[in-house]
Amino acid sequence: SPDPTAGSPSRNEALFERSAARIPGGVNSPVRAFRAVGGTPVFFVRGQGPLLWDADGRTYIDYVGSWGPAILGHAHPEVVAAVKAQAERGLGFGAPTELELHMAELICRLMPSVEQVRLVSSGTEATMSAIRLARGYTGRARIVKFEGCYHGHGDALLVKAGSGALTFGQPSSAGVPEETVAHTLVLDYNDTVGLEETFARLGHEIAAVIVEPIAGNMNLVLPRLDFLQRLRSLCTQHGALLIFDEVMTGFRVGLTGAQGLFGIRPDLTTLGKVIGGGLPVAAFGGRREIMRCLAPLGPVYQAGTLSGNPVAVAAGLATLKLVQAEGFYDRLADTARTLTEGLVAIARRKGVPFSAQAIGGMFGLYFRESPPSTYAEVMACDREAFNRFFHRMLQEGVYLAPSAFEAGFVSAAHGPAEIERTLEAAQRAFAALGS
Ligand code: PMP
């Protein structure tokens, strides 16, 4: 792969080599390792707005955004000030604070399907807890997920999963006993017929269906509206709970999440990423009657030493305050659309089979003629072409997610200048692919 620092000593490479000795794969989360695209991962030392600086002093326009949280760009002054102010009052008490109340009230106000909410520290915890709660509430064991959707690395959900699991060709993990996932049914995303058949056969045994209402962990795949609507009505009809995993889409595609965009009311919702503003906050919430089954009120146990940590919640609240500004999501969507339309136009001129689409502040890039709507179509994308494009863009100072199976993110700090620079880089990257 092209290395801009070839021949000169690279701090990135030295850091990665040392890290690999003490951290498995040199990283604390697999996709960071660049295994799918090859080459050395970039060690970042600083972020500001839409930009990142690496250990070798190079700058990049960032389209990963910490995998979603950085919706305001990096180190937004109001978020940083909120974190500093709270840190000076204490880092955490393991007791309730008023900040958590503000966060809960805000989430319930913006997402009407959420009547009560509990804060946790990662998306994985949120989905794991939501599944346990759904099973406890319904008294049923089976859960349904969709191939290519990723819901964190809880055992029951780590089956035919997306994101890093997919990137490394191990969508189902070793170390998860068959018995543990015996109750997990995996169906095809956007396949309404498969859904009907499964509910006809097993509907009375299904505790919950968990779905990314916009799939963002097998690249970006938009749902068919009738698929989500049928999912809602089948769950209601059979007494199963519908869980929208909005860890990625919540406050990313709009102020009311994918559920607001599509007008569908799930029973439970999981949130993460943006609600922590870059620090570890996630949440699960939904109908009061279900949430009341949680300890200390009910028999479903769930807890966390750092749950609702005040410094993290302060960052989240400062972020959620700013995203409520008039027109925030319209501008964000414009930015993402300008980017994807620009890329598609350039690729067409250069004769590269390519398509792209955006929804709110997230986007998908596909090395195929049209955006995929199924897992199989995602698999048919040209991964080699993506990898070459990725490295050329990296060399040009554009940081894309290092896998063909991840969605991309823009922030409110990405302006016309960043988009223009990105499209200029893409002219050269697509030209290199075309030849
Ligand atoms: N659900 C979805 C939809 C996600 O995108 C992710 C993370 N990418 C998770 C759950 C897991 O969240 P975390 O990495 O915070 O555990």
Image: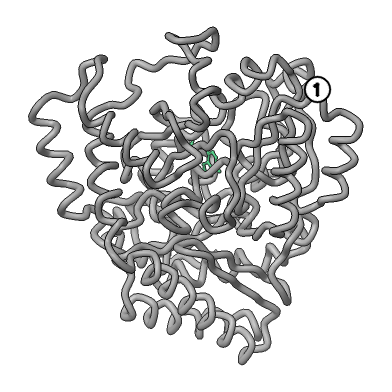
Visible residue check, residue 260 = yes
Q: Residue at x 66, y 44 (%)?
A: 149
Q: Nearer the viewer, residue 425 or 25?
A: 425
Amino acid on which disc 1 is placed = Glu
Q: Picture coordinates of residue 342 (x, y %)? A: 51, 83
Q: Residue at x 62, y 18 (%)?
A: 137
Query: Which residue is disc 1 drawn over?
Result: 205
Count every numbered label the image shows and give the total. 1
Q: Give the vertical position of 202 relative to 47 (above or below).
A: above
| Mark 1 surroundings: few (<14), some (14-19) or many (≥20) residues within 10 A | some
Q: Nearer the viewer, residue 257 or 394?
A: 257
Q: Give the vertical position of 196 relative to 284 (above or below).
A: below
Q: Picture coordinates of residue 371 (x, y %)? A: 69, 69
Q: Quadrant of the N terminus?
A: bottom right
Q: Residue at x 22, y 53 (%)?
A: 75
Seen as rendered, the residue at the extreme bottom is 349
Q: Residue at x 34, y 75 (%)?
A: 418
Visible residue check, residue 36 = no
Q: Give the vertical position of 71 relative to 147 (above or below).
A: below
Q: Give the vertical position of 119 relative to 317 (above or below).
A: above
Q: Picture coordinates of residue 194 (x, y %)? A: 86, 45
Looking at the rendering, which quadrant does residue 201 occupy? Answer: top right
Disc 1 secondary structure class? helix
Q: Nearer the viewer, residue 64 or 310?
A: 310
Q: Picture coordinates of residue 53 (x, y %)? A: 28, 59
- Please give left or right for residue 249 compared with residue 188 in the image: left
- Please give left or right for residue 160 compared with residue 24 in the image: right
Q: Nearer the viewer, residue 362 or 26?
A: 362
* Protein image colouring: one colour
Q: Quadrant of the C terminus?
A: bottom right
